[in-house]
Amino acid sequence: MISLFIKGLVIGIIVSAPVGPIGILCVQRTLNKGRATGFATAIGATLSDLVYALIAVFSMTFVTNFIETHQFGLRLGGCAAIFLYGLYTYIDNPVKKLHKMQPTKDYAQALLSAFGLTITNPLVILLFMALFAKFNFMGEEMTTAKDLLGVCFIMLGASIWWLLLVNIVSRFRGRFNIRGLWIVNRATGIMLMLLSVGAFVFWII
């Protein structure tokens, strides 16, 4: 149970950490409208991740035997996927997308708009599957109840990340430079790439 909890938290944080368009939107709304609007935006993004996590979990339930049979290839693919995701995060320039996003005073609108923007990216399912394979999140001992509990842990990890981001931005609201997100993006990308390389080296030794 502890292992499932830790893995779920790590997966949730990895999925949420890169500062893409939704991260920019969350930061922008926190800066312009306050902590509550920023966190409402974060909840919308988290709910979208919840949908995709559930799809990934119950899709993988049907292919558990396939995963165990092709464990080598899937783990290698998982490392590669995380590395490429980190590389994309490193080279992406989210500031360019900032002008397309307008702040809102309505919390429900903030939540729903973030959900709508995030749910349009079904590739998140592939990221979840890659992470599930990489961290051996699924197994024969998993039941439907444990699957759902694992998803709850993933959402907890995502929520912790968003809560930290919103509170940090809110705390330094008067001094925060939006272009500093370039640094955040690059640092996150580097960490993801180092994580994938380190995991691969540790795995083959």
Image (cartoon, grey):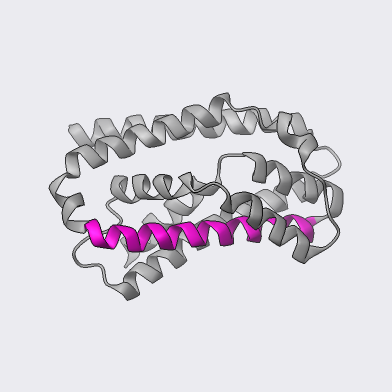
Report the predominant secondary structure element of the magenta stretch: helix
* Side (left or right) of 13 relative to 24: left
Return the x and y of residue 124 as percentages of the image width and height.
47, 47
Name the quarter where the N terminus is drawn.
bottom left
- 86 up-or-down from 139: above or below: above
Return the x and y of residue 20 as percentages of the image width and height.
62, 39
- 57 up-or-down from 120: above or below: below
Q: Report whether residue 163 is seen.
A: no
Name the quarter where the C terminus is drawn.
top left
Who's the residue at 34% across and 75% down the image? Answer: 145
Give the residue furthest to the top: 91
Return the x and y of residue 59 as percentages of the image width and height.
33, 59
Residue 133 belongs to magenta span = no
Q: Report whether residue 62 is seen.
A: yes
Who's the residue at 83% across and 37% down the image? Answer: 175
Give the residue furthest to the bottom: 145
Pick the residue in front: 201 or 108. Answer: 108
Residue 38 belongs to magenta span = yes
Give the residue furthest to the left: 69
- 93 up-or-down from 9: above or below: above
Who's the residue at 79% across and 49% down the image? Answer: 29
Return the x and y of residue 47 as percentages of the image width and height.
57, 62
What is the count of numbered marks? 0
Start-end of magenta stretch: 35-63
Pick the residue in front: 188 or 53. Answer: 53
